[in-house]
Image (cartoon, rainbow, N blue to C red):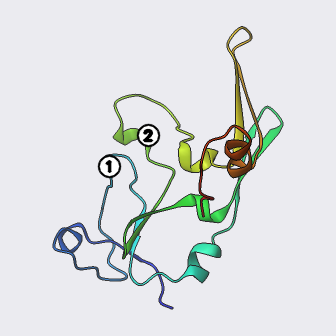
Amino acid sequence: MSQLGRVDETRASRGELDQGVVESYVFEGALDLCFGGSISGSIVGGVPEVVLMFRGEEISISGERLLYRVSDRVFCFTFGNSDLVPVEAYIIGHHHQRDKWVEYDLQNSRVGFGKARCDLVGHRLGMPTTRSR
């Protein structure tokens, strides 16, 4: 198991990674906290969960949902820098919403989140699904 190192953009474009190099690397225009190196399952599983608080309500996001695998040797945190997109926003994307029930109350301008087992919901609705990591 090796430590995660910041990705050097020039080397990454050639398929090389150098652990410990602090250079900027941006994936898909928003994910700017990316790491390279040999990443074992214990590192990915060792990322602590993040709790988002909305007016006293909490949404827990497990550590494995906080890293996106760009390639075999590059992972990026799934929270992006809002300065890199053309609008001021914070995005709770599909990585964070996995196994969450999302309910939209348009009349009252509210969004609700709850725990869900998407594989079971899909099965009950007759939709073939595979359990995500």
Query: Outermost residue toward the right?
Result: 56
Whole-percent x and y of residue 111?
70, 26
Viewer-nearest of labels 2 and 1? 1
Figure label count: 2
Q: Residue at x 47, y 89 (%)?
A: 2
Q: Residues within 10 Å of mark 2 (few under 14, many from 20)?
A: some
Residue beneath label 2, please? 82
- Residue 85 figure quarter: top left
Marker disc for residue 28: 1
In this rendering, is residue 61 above or below 90? Answer: below
Left or right, 57 with respect to 39, comes to right
Q: Residues within 10 Å of mark 1 (few under 14, many from 20)?
A: few
Marker disc for residue 44: none
Q: Residue at x 40, y 28 (%)?
A: 87
Callout 1: SS = loop
Callout 2: SS = helix
In this rendering, is residue 71 above or below 96? Answer: below
